[in-house]
Amino acid sequence: DFQVDLHLANNCLLKVTETVRYDFEGGQRPVLYRRIPLRYERHDINERLAILPLFVKDGDKPMPYTCKIVGDFAILQIGDNKAMLSGQHVFSIQYDASNAVNFHSGKPELFWSCLGTELPCRVDRLRVVLHCPPKVNLSAVKTLSYLGHSGAKGRSQGKVVGDTIQFSAQHLISGQDFSCVATLPSGSLSAPS
């Protein structure tokens, strides 16, 4: 299972928390890698995210990690080669992302690639929960999600659930991305300077 919580601030900073249930299925590994895509294309313009890792946990226990930028990816190495990872784990990865919101259409548009095409395992269930600033009228937010590769056709719309917008998918295969787009009403976010 993979859950992504996206907390969008008025200044367009995005706080991302990924909660990943991972089963090593009888195997062992000294480290686990998470490749976060940094480049995306919207409206024929290439954009690049900036990522600031905040923490990685296994349950409540802080995990050692390193992060390096390689090409169009931020690569998180979770673990330190001192202890083997095996069995079932629930990893929480939190980081800040800037430049995830563009204003190319005149309205603030959040585009988020939840998995990237580099994830080397299947995902049984994916849930994305978008938390917008309190003043945003959620019923006026236009949403769409994409399943597959870059350039895939729109799949479905997000649903307003309480004070969030939620997207979901099931049975994603290795290398299959899930991206979501939320176009907010004009004036609902401040464009970064």
Image (cartoon, rainbow, N blue to C red):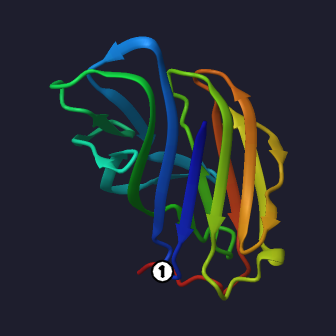
How many numbered discs, if any? Answer: 1
Spot occupied by residue 183 in the image (x, y as percentages of width and height):
72, 68
- Quarter containing the C terminus: bottom left
Spot occupied by residue 62 in the image (x, y as percentages of width and height):
27, 48
Relative to 50, is 149 above or below? Answer: above
Taking the spot 56% from the left edge, 58% from the top edge, the residue there is: 5
Instruction: Decide which of 100, 169 is in the foreground and name it.
Output: 169
Q: Amino acid at mark 1?
A: Asn
Taking the spot 84% from the left edge, 48% from the top edge, the residue there is: 156
Taking the spot 48% from the left edge, 80% from the top edge, the residue there is: 11
Decide if residue 43 is in sight here.
no
- Residue 8 placement, left or right of 156: left
Q: Secondary structure at mark 1?
A: loop
Relative to 77, is 179 above or below? Answer: below
- Residue 71 placement, left or right of 66: right
Spot occupied by residue 84 in the image (x, y as percentages of width and height):
26, 21
Taking the spot 77% from the left edge, 76% from the top edge, the residue there is: 138
- What residue did someone put label 1 on? 11
- Quarter containing the N terminus: top right
| Mark 1 surroundings: few (<14), some (14-19) or many (≥20) residues within 10 A | some
